[in-house]
Amino acid sequence: MIVNDKKDDKQIQNLNSSDPVWKWMTTNPYTVRPKQTLREAITILQTYRIDGLPVVDGTNRVVGLITRTKLMSCFLEGLSADSPVEAVMTEPVVTIDQQEAITTAYELPVGRLPVVDEAGRLVGILTRTDLLHCYAEHIGQLQQTLHIAETLSTILESAYEGVVVIDANGYIQEFNNAYCRFIGKKREEVIGQHVTQIIENTRLHIVIQTGVAEKGYIQRIQGQDMVVHRIPILKEGKVVGAIGMLIFHGVTELYNILGRMQELSRQVSANSTAADNPYIELDSFDKIIGQSAQIQAVKRMARKVAGTPSTVLITGESGTGKEMFAKAIHELSSYAEGNFISVNCAAIPEHLLEAELFGYEDGAFTGAKKGGKPGKFELAHKGTLFLDEVGDMPLFMQTKILRVLQEREVERVGGIAKHKIDVRIIAATNQHLEEMVAEGKFREDLYYRLNIIRLEIPPLRERQEDIPVLLNQYLDHFSDRFGFGPKSFGREAMAALVNYSWPGNVRELVNTVEMLVNLSETAIITEQELLPKHRTNDLVEFSSSPAQKEKGLLMDIKDSVFIKEREMIIQALHETNGNKAAASRNLGIQRSTLYEKMKKYRITL
């Protein structure tokens, strides 16, 4: 029921009109140039799962717009994928100034609205999803005033896509005409009904439970596969409703076209690189999951770092994803054409570490490979060498590493020749190197050589809003990988996992989700299926001190899945009489991974 409350109405109007467009727009949108081919535009659309691209000239001024719908129409007409974008782009284009009030955008009947500055240069893009996010935050709930209803109606009915709005209990509050036409029902027949009774295969009610947006999902409705967005509506951190949107209308007739687009995208990916096309930036940081301000800030800094040759020191607790950041930096750097070589300084025995890093000559020691072997530094020439767990490197090796960094040349074990190297160094540690320097456990001069640009990866407990996103991402991944049907977390289970301290960070989260997918016998994972440590309120407070790390480690080992892994490693070592190379092959893991797990589980021979 809609109540006309003029006080609330005035408050809402003031909130809406005071917000400029720039506050709600999506910044740094992907673009194409007029002379680029449709093939290249398709690649960007497919890679980044977006619906349209502004076309800009050399001064970044908007000259056109190309959308998925337009591309599909072009393919239906038989247009070549090598045709230029300018041949089919929509022009002139409706744009909006970034300082305009957001309410102005509500009245423009377009799906993607380029946002420009005072000079007419593109600074962002405003989509209907952005508008719905804005509207949802301003109203905070789904009923209040006549003005709210009228404004919402304008948004809903100007949308080409079907749009549904539900309250916190899953009951439909709004349903636009496009959606009504698609399912063959009248609006009055669906308002007030539970969404599961109206829309088949919906997950909107699950989004209310998890509070996590689901964008670009495939949903079977009326015998057709539809692309949908599901967006929770939050008020003061509490989910009070959700919005569902259909992105395509009747895609069955376009399956062949989509297949051709995907094939073209694969061809472009196989035959070209980002270096060949300066307009396509395949950003490896997109693989690092997280929406929190903390992780976004680190990603922004890491992107800047990638463009320099400087040495980077990545710090953070175990399991936070330091190697993922190192790989992303490498892939966006000028060293990307070279190898990314990773060395775990804690996993390689001390007597082998020098040979692994610097290589060795023929006959350098008993068992040396005939003809010798290049070390990691040589293999990383013109590429990146990632020194993981550098804080565990013995002092005698620290001295040798420092010399290499200073002279930029290596000498193999048992050799006399110098090998020049051009290597980007990225180091990582979960230890406090400053304390180790003060205690004489880490060379001060090496510390300053490594600590040129520093990235601190926040622990998972400090970016709590990322936990539901990670949980759902890996839940879908493992459900699909193991051939199970779709699974989701119940409300209580999700709340417990979000409030858990995750001493093992993302690595522990991934292992936990994999275990739950394997052990859960129902589509919805309940709180009762969680490990005791996840269910209790007596959560472990985790810090970087050795005592706390030991406590967190022991908790992990107590978990049945980790106990099983430890038993498998011991059994493999027993069957191979302690031969680690053979054991790692039998286990299907790298030898360095075996060393790491042996150290983690306190396995000694």
Image (tube, rainbow, N blue to C red):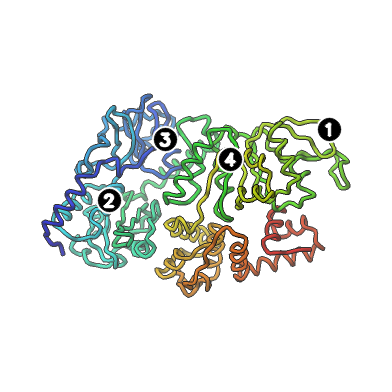
**N-term mark: 2 or 4:** 2
Q: Secondary structure at mark 1?
A: loop
Determine if residue 371 is in view.
no
Q: Amino acid at mark 1?
A: Ile
Q: CA distance from mark 1 to mark 4?
A: 30 Å
Is the C-beta separation of discs 1 and 2 under 8 Å?
A: no
**N-term mark: 4 or 3:** 3
Is the C-beta separation of discs 1 and 4 under 8 Å?
A: no
Residue bearing the label numbered 1:
416
Is the C-beta separation of discs 2 and 4 under 8 Å?
A: no
**N-term mark: 1 or 2:** 2
Q: Closest to the observer: 602 or 119?
A: 602
Residue bearing the label numbered 4:
312
Q: Residues within 10 Å of mark 4 (few under 14, many from 20)?
A: many
Residue bearing the label numbered 2:
132
Is the C-beta separation of discs 4 and 3 under 8 Å?
A: no
Q: Position of residue 471 (x, y in %)?
A: 47, 60
Q: CA distance from mark 1 to mark 2?
A: 68 Å
Residue drawn 19% across and 45% down? 17
Is the C-beta separation of discs 1 and 3 under 8 Å?
A: no
> Which numbered tag is attached to residue 502?
none
Q: Secondary structure at mark 3?
A: helix
**N-term mark: 3 or 2:** 3
Q: Point out the image quarter for the N terminus.
A: bottom left
Q: Residues within 10 Å of mark 3 (few under 14, many from 20)?
A: many
Furthest toward the bottom, the residue is 528
